Amino acid sequence: MPANHFNTQCPDWAEALLNGFSQIFLQRNPLCGLLCLCAILFTAPALLGGALLGGLAGLLTAQRRNYAKADRQAGLFSYNGVLLGLLLSLYFPWSAMMPPLILAAGGLSAMITQQWLKRVRLSQNMPAYTAPFVGLSWLLLLFAAPSVPAPLVEVNTLNLLAAVLKGFGQVMFLGHPLAGAMIAAGLLIADRRAFCWALLASAIGLGSSLLHHETSFALFGLGGYNAVLATLAFSSERRQPWLPLLGIVLALLVTPLFAAIGLATLTAPFILACWLIRAGIQMLGKATVDGASCAHGENQPRLR
């Protein structure tokens, strides 16, 4: 079914929620979002309730506070809530307190996103990406039990191919290759160029981890998922094809920093890599404008 036909058959609230799932991968496509949702349903059904509750919390908060409908429909207030719901469902046992906690976290992430959007549009600041999710998760994980070490996985051709797919799924804490395959299919539907870059990023992340003798880390797809997100952030830059590759490299370079300072990695390397690239682009753009002004003898104020 074509995506545009799917949109016409989908209620506004459902489209906004599905777009929230696809926005985790920087896409706006309800079919992609549906496949992301199905990836959770088929490979980690225990996490589905938390993901839906977190996404709905962000959407309902945005509706109640009358945030821009275009932003709500694009899924911009849901994706951080989805990720928070997944994290809470994964790291904490379900109890009577869990649903209110997910609702509160998802709603707070929507409010943070709204304030960030306002400042980005007013002053061209850095995009939020998944920063609300990461910041709130670091606070929540202070109260979580220590994670269990991952079991050893044998290095063979099948596991290497599976690890490339897991690089897609680990963005949403999904370590099953089927989850990665479904998410990859969603990206292929949404944007073939983005899919190709993401596949390359996951493979490079896997290879980099293996070169650094992080075998278990690599075979669980944990070496590639931040590179996947970083390249997706710049995959539409057709005039500057080196930007997605730079995103991959920077994401891989900064990943060890978070473990070194005792913070959960989550999607923080992706955010930092993208912010560094955008800061560099802004500095180069400003230098070009200032240089041109000096060359032409202009006494105009510097562009911000």
Image (cartoon, rainbow, N blue to C red):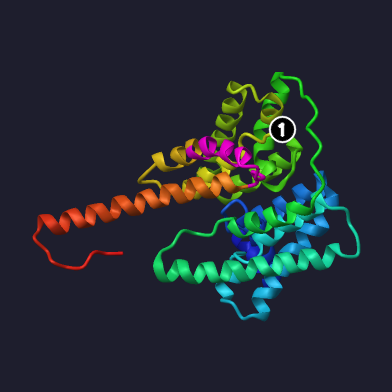
68 vs 80, left or right, is: left
Compare residues 174 and 185 and report the one nearer the observer.
Answer: 174
* Vertical relation: 13 (above or below) 231: below
Q: Is residue 113 visible?
A: yes
Q: Quadrant of residue 63?
A: bottom right
Seen in the picture, residue 237 relative to 118 is either above or below; the reply is above
Task: Label 1: state its secondary structure.
Answer: loop
The amino acid marked with disc number 1 is Phe
Q: Which residue is mark 1?
A: 220
The kind of secondary structure the magenta stretch mainly shows is: helix
Q: Nearer the viewer, residue 167 or 213?
A: 213
Kindly indicate the quadrant of the structure image that contains residue 260. Answer: top right
**Residues packed near mark 1 inside 10 Å, few (<14), some (14 to 19) or many (20 plus):** many
Residue in the image at 59% along x and 64% along y: 76
Residue drawn 39% across and 52% down? 279
* Residue at 83% in and 52% down: 92
Location of residue 163 in the rendering, given as x and y in whole percent from the top left corner: 68, 30
Compared to 158, does 230 lie above or below? Answer: below
| Residue extending farthest front | 261
The stretch drawn in magenta includes residue 251: yes
**Residue 2 visible within the image:** no
Q: Is residue 256 left or right of residue 238?
A: right
Q: Residue furthest right?
A: 96
Q: Position of residue 240 (x, y in %)?
A: 37, 44
> x, y (%) of residue 265?
64, 43
Say whether residue 253 is left or right of residue 283. Answer: right
Q: Split into 4 quadrants, where in the image is the N terminus?
A: bottom right
Residue 134 place in picture, x, y as percent? 63, 54
Q: Is residue 124 magenta?
A: no
What's drawn in magenta, residue-wise? 250-266
